[in-house]
Amino acid sequence: MFKLADSLRSASPRLLLRTGIDALRILRFAVGIVVALYFFSVAAQPSRAAANPSETSAPAESLSIGGAAINVAIEPGDLILTRIRILDWVRRSACAVTEYYAGFPVRNVNVKVVPLGEGKGVVFGRTVVVDQTPVIRVGLSRFATESSLLDDWVMTHEMVHLAFPSVADEHHWIEEGIATYVEPIARAQVGDLSPQKVWGDLVDGLPKGLPAPGDRGLDITHTWGRTYWGGALFCFMADVEIHRRTNNRYGLQDALRGIVRAGGSMEHDWPLTRALKVGDDATGVPVLTELYDKMKATAVTPDLSAMWRELGVRSSGDSVVFDQGAPLAAVLRSIMERRSSPGAECVRQGDDRRIPASIDTSTDRWPTTTSH
Ligand SMILES: [Zn+2]
């Protein structure tokens, strides 16, 4: 899928510690900037939003998932989708994030769904912190259907943003990179996305994160490609390397869980080096710190074709197939395996989709349990 999103920083630090906007299905970057500026203007004027009675009149419903209270308010407006369907979409996204991080990353979050008279599905997503409470605001087209929600990545992407501390502006790539890389894997681990879709999209997307001529390191070149996909490339390289060095005992998932366990969620400002060190301590190998030292100021171009060969990911038509005989095939399997038991609130009766889809038409399946 073509992913286009943009981000910006708040000019109102008292109310908005960090702002990220993820708009999608916008075909031109310039249009993305216009959209970002529009939402920036709204975000930067909280008094105007507060003066609008529709901001406060939407009744909230609280979902209890992964130890968190997820307070969902659907603002007034026309929608085809029912309230039940929308709540189920939020719940599914929260369950994917809960399983990836072994718990929802914050104790309390407000989710505001804003009906829009335009677009097709989920039109934009933005996550901010207001007075210490994270707020996810997602624009939903009045024409959105149940299948729009089943295909949606935005809600999960925004929730992943909760699971990393706020860092200085020059490191924004790590925030978007983690959200871009983790979202599909988290959804696959709960059976909401096929492994072929996850890796097919990474094969398509990661080259957009490679440095263009003249680009410098991730802390210096802040284009859309280097921010979202360059950040995802960092995560992918780190994930493979942690798995490789620890013989698949640990991966990026363990590092990111360690950061959340240490209190590194979005409400808190941390230096990036602290977050990376905490992540490294959780896996016992200093991969994040070493990779950051390599990529922060210098353009690094990994040989992605060679990495796909080693991992056993081969393009096949519109999708990919997995070569279980590849040297690092076990790394790929380990990245995809589920690392926790689902919480009771995430088990759907009669739902067998929680078993991840088979790798291909052969009898191979992704492991569904793990010992760590
Ligand atoms: Zn984002």
Image (cartoon, helix red, strand yellow):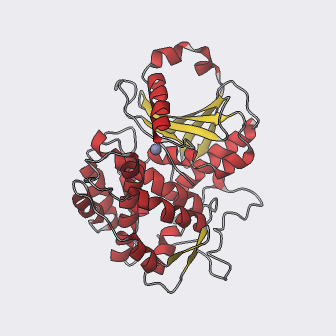
Place of residue 84 in the rendered image (x, y in percent of width and height, measured from the top left)? 74, 40
Which residue lies at the image location 66% right of the left edge and 32% below the top edge?
118
Place of residue 214 in the rendered image (x, y in percent of width and height, measured from the top left)? 26, 53
Determine whether, in the image, residue 145 is placed left or right of residue 357.
right
As drawn, 63 above or below 355: above
> Residue lying furthest top in this view?
51
**Tally of numbered tags:** 0
> Between residues 276 and 232, which one lies in front from this camera angle?
232
> Residue lying furthest bottom in this view?
325
State which quadrant residue 303 falls in.
Answer: bottom left
Which residue lies at the image location 65% right of the left edge and 30% below the top edge?
116
> Between residues 107 and 272, which one lies in front from this camera angle?
272
As drawn, 48 above or below 297: above
Place of residue 86 in the rendered image (x, y in percent of width and height, measured from the top left)? 69, 40
Determine whether, in the image, residue 115 is placed left or right of residue 177.
right
Asked whether residue 318 appears in the rendered view, the answer is yes
State which quadrant residue 331 falls in.
Answer: bottom left
Place of residue 329 in the rendered image (x, y in percent of width and height, measured from the top left)? 48, 80
Asked whether residue 102 appears in the rendered view, the answer is no
Q: Quadrant for the N terminus, please.
A: bottom right
Which residue lies at the image location 61% right of the left edge and 75% below the top edge?
359
